[in-house]
Image (cartoon, grey):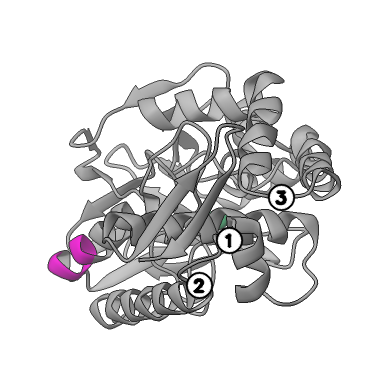
Amino acid sequence: MREVADGILQLTLPLPFGLDHVHCYLLRRPTGGWLLVDTGLGMHDWEESWGRVAEELDAPIEQIFITHFHPDHVGGAADVQRVTGAEVLQGALDHRLLLDLWGDGTWAARAFDVFRAHGVPEDISGEIFASMDAMRPEVRYAESVTRLEPGDDVDGWQVMLLGGHADGHLALWRDGILVGGDNLLLEITPNIGYTLDGDSDPLGTYLETLARIEALAPRLTLPGHGPLVVDSVARARETLAHHDGRLAETVAALGRREPRDAYQVSLALWAYDLVPIHRRFAVQETIAHLERLVCEGRVRRHSDDGGSVAYTAA
Ligand SMILES: [Zn+2]
């Protein structure tokens, strides 16, 4: 735990992925207590770990704010709530998507169909969904939450909707400081993935988020992963340029005559062996780029009667 700004502590928790950590933040409340932003993945020794965090603090964790429903941010919410008794604040849309994804078993079957439509072989899809199922025990979200909407106020922090990485992703904004979740990261770029029942153009939404951050010009962005972002405007521009390059590569991976599906394109763009979770990110990110290009008129989408989707360069 370290102080990163006046009245703001950063708490870094381990993750068992290629991405080996996630940052949570503790924001000092007007009551003197703490507002915890994000909770990491559920831990097997949660009682001991969160008990130790609570002990190290000079005041209780009174509220928990969730930026978005991805496992590394929401997975420990119920654990912290049990240890501290804190109220959990979560975006209304975010909470609905959370229950869709982790709440019942129907999501995987429907997502399987989407992957099939985009050309992902069944054995690869099987591996992808098995890896998600394996993560399920570590996703211990809070059952009862206070739902937030964009524009709400939490201790003087403005609740902002910054979409693209996740539909309904919320951030906090006050005094030039953006508690940004996964929207702006320094050494990596957040995965922008097409998801079931979600935004039909997540990359378009994310590019708007980057423009919004550029306009806000935070003096400090507190990210979910990696180093603090001091020059947020420069990083927003770099990330924008990264996606411009990626869009051009995506067009280049398509021909004009022979349609290619998103899975084939993802293999061209990410031409190395990926573990199932990363293959999923690659396919979803490729679809997001293809759909943005369709919106821009640079790519054509072709659907056949069987529901298969493929693309050509326009
Ligand atoms: Zn994350």
- x 58%, y 57%: residue: 262
**Callout 1 amino acid:** Arg
Would you identify the image quadrant in which residue 314 lies? bottom left
What secondary structure prevails in the magenta region?
Answer: helix
Could you tell me if the residues under marks 2 and 1 are in contact, i.e. CB atoms within 8 Å? yes
Relative to residue 108, is residue 39 depicted above or below?
A: below
Q: Which mark is residue 260?
A: 1
C-alpha gap between disc 3 and disc 1: 12 Å
Q: Quadrant of ligand 1?
A: bottom right
Question: Badge 1, how many Cα within 10 Å: few under 14, some, many 20+?
Answer: many
Q: Secondary structure at mark 3?
A: loop
Q: Is residue 87 visible?
A: no
Q: Residue furthest left?
A: 215
Cβ of mark 1 under 8 Å from ligand 1: the answer is no
Say whether disc 3 or disc 1 marks the residue closer to the N-terminus.
3
Q: Which of the two marks, 3 or 1, is nearer to us in this view?
A: 1
Give 65 or 289, whichever is nearer the viewer: 289
Is 254 left, or right, of 178 in this rendering? right
Is residue 214 a member of the stretch shown in magenta?
yes
Give 190 or 270, whichever is nearer the viewer: 270
Q: Which residues are magenta?
A: 211-215
Is 67 left, or right, of 271 in this rendering? left
Identify residue for label 2: 255
C-alpha gap between disc 2 and disc 1: 8 Å
Relative to residue 131, is residue 261 depicted above or below?
A: below
Q: Secondary structure at mark 1?
A: loop
Identify residue for label 3: 120
- x 23%, y 64%: residue: 213
Q: Is residue 111 visible?
A: yes
Say whether disc 2 or disc 3 marks the residue closer to the N-terminus.
3
